[in-house]
Image (spheres, rainbow, N blue to C red):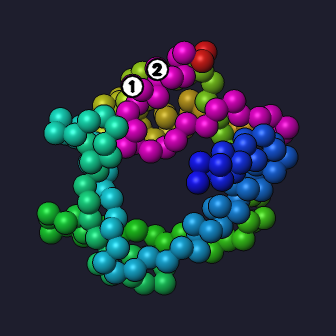
Amino acid sequence: RSRIWGTTSWLLENKRERSQQDGAYIAELIGHATVEVGEPWWFYHGQELADFSESDHRRNWYLGRVVEVYEDRFAAKVCKADTVEWFSRLGRNDADGLLLKAQSSLHCIEWENISLNLMEGASGSGRLDLDDDQLFALSRPVGEGEVIDFFISHSWQDSGRLKFKALEELA
């Protein structure tokens, strides 16, 4: 298992000319994933629950279940609450279409615009005094032929402090 993972990791990381196509292919797979009633669905709450370690996703996420599924959307409900939330289904794009869409909308953020406060906050969480437009203004389009140095996950389940510390060590 570790050999397969190592080889796959090496291929994805060291074959730059294929990495975009690989990403589009993986996105296409995700886009064709099924959502079924009864499946788990995680809801972000951002409360930093002290009962869980920083690396435990339950620190900021509640477990829910998918309760209804339609062609264009589905509903999920937090297990310990009565609230139902609706989500759009991912589009059914092919890898080439996803790649073109990603390339045309790809943005990056310069190191000088990244702060610990930014990494720990989330839009609408009350931790930042920036609205979505102001946050987006911190970024810029990626130029033709330009390569992003690092991708930072949008996952709010990961500690922003730990992400910032790792980036700071690299900068």
Where does the image place residue 122, in percent across and percent down from the top left?
A: 38, 38
* Closer to the camera in the image, 95 or 144: 95
Q: Report the quarter where the C terminus lies.
A: top right
Does the rendering let one see residue 102?
no
Mark 2, Cα crowd under 10 Å, few <14 / some 14-19 / many 20+, is some
Residue 145: x and y in percent read: 85, 37
- Residue ID for mark 2: 165
Q: Is residue 43 above or below residue 74?
A: above
Q: Relative to 27, is 156 on the left or the right?
A: left
Q: Which picture quadrant has residue 30? A: bottom right
Q: Give how far across and how far down residue 134 sits, in percent.
A: 49, 34
Which residue sits at x=42%, y=21%?
116
Report the magenta residues as a range: 143-169
Image vertical order of residue 86 relative to residue 2, above or below? below
Q: How many marks?
A: 2
Residue neighbourhood size for the residue with mark 1, other residues' Cα within 10 Å, grouped as few (<14), some (14–19), many (≥20): some
Front-lying residue, 59 or 89? 59
Q: Are marks 2 and 1 in contact (CB under 8 Å)?
A: yes
Between 11 and 164, the one nearer to me in the picture: 11
Q: Residue at x 37, y 43 (%)?
A: 157
What's under tag 2, amino acid-wise? Lys
Q: Is residue 159 magenta?
A: yes
Left or right of residue 145, residue 75 in this image: left
Task: Name the residue type under label 1.
Answer: Arg
Element class at badge 1: helix
Q: Residue at x 65, y 67 (%)?
A: 28
Q: Is residue 29 left or right of residue 45?
A: right
Estimate the spatial distance between the alpha carbons at disc 2 and disc 1, rounded to whole Å.
6 Å
Q: State whether residue 2 is above or below residue 91.
A: above
Q: Which mark is residue 161?
A: 1
